[in-house]
Image: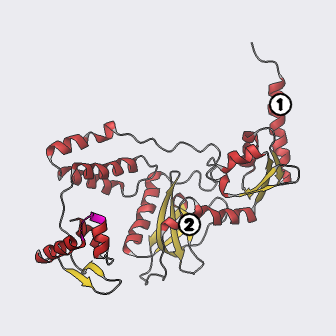
Amino acid sequence: MGILLLLRGGRIVSATELASRFEVSIRTIYRDIEVLSGLGVPVGADMGRAGGFRLREGYFLPPITLGPEEATSLLLGLILMRRLRVMPFPAEADFAERKLLAALPAETRTALDRASRFIGFETVPPDLLHPELGDPKMGLGPPPSVESVVVGAFLRALLSRARVTLAYHSPHRDKEAPREVEPLGIVWDRDRWYLVGRPAEGEGNRMWRADRVIEIHPGRSMPPLKGDFDVRTILERRWLRKPMERWKAETPAKIAMSHEQADRLKRDWYYGMTDFAETEDGRVVMTYGEFWVEAATALVRWLGPGAELLEPLEWRAALAGELEVLLAAHRRDRPS
């Protein structure tokens, strides 16, 4: 069964790789392949240095029985998904859980049916340094149920190698016209879903935040664009570098701070991805893109003494006014 599951991936797997995977001899692997062939499984063998075994197209693997630990792993995944702000295919996930529980022995089913009562996953807490300030035209975005439809439609197209047409609106720029996109992947980060795709216009890969997608529809039937994509190449928030460079060019902001404050910010998931440069006076200047004066002044107040908002110059007056209010409050005598 393990060999079958590996071969179902569609790639050629060598006898050496199979022997290493299952910690048996190559001779044992050849005997197992003979047994599978005798049972009617269409295992093909490719000769040569890059040769190995593969399943011929059209083979259907019948349902398999899951052990208690295998079933628990799948159910844990479902429980974790329910703790996300947006869950793709919520109704289908409920049916999948019922089918999984129905196929298990009664003793295992009883134990797993109580899993949600003794296994807990905390939700992602609010991000106080990067609050959702909202958009006057869109508010704080659609409810999770609407966003779930967007994510589900994108995933269906991704799995079927089809394109989608989506319309997008960010609070930082005008609404984009609908465009046809080849889905490449999907990323979950800090309780948000991000859609990764390649526009048909050929401008390179892009990402869209799912809760800012206004419309999504199946696209025209077209052959997929050439080129392989691996979502692992943009994880560890490497996907943030390109948009942060664009934001820094559009709306640059600069904050001077001490080395200790800079070290603290470099550990942040967002500010740690931007630029820090030492100055002649011994301070460190962080340059990044910022759209809202409220976010910049809040960051300087959070950093505390030693931090100075350098640019934009017009924001310094707003920060000075906030600090004067704080100063006046703290100069008053403490209440008894």
The x and y percentages for residue 313 are 86, 53
Residue 297: tell me if it is visible: no
Q: Is residue 199 left or right of residue 264?
A: left
**For mark 2, does the 10 Å Cα neighbourhood hold few (<14), some (14 to 19), or many (20 or more) residues?**
some
The numbered disc on residue 327 is: 1
Residue located at (30% from left, 53% from top): 74
On the picture, is 39 further left or further right than 138?
A: left
What residue is pinned by disc 2? 207
Amino acid under label 2? Answer: Met
Which SS does the magenta portion mostly show?
loop
Residue farthest toward the top in the current orientation of the protein:
336
Quarter of the image where the C terminus is located: top right
Residue 75: which numbered mark, if any? none
The reply to whether the C-beta atoms of the residues labelled 1 and 2 are less than 8 Å apart is no
Q: Residue at x 26, y 79 (%)?
A: 53
Quadrant of residue 120 within the rendered picture: top left
Is residue 183 a member of the stretch shown in magenta? no
> Which quadrant would residue 8 be assigned to in this image?
bottom left
**Which of the 4 image quarters holds residue 289?**
bottom right
Question: Which residue reaches farthest right?
Answer: 281
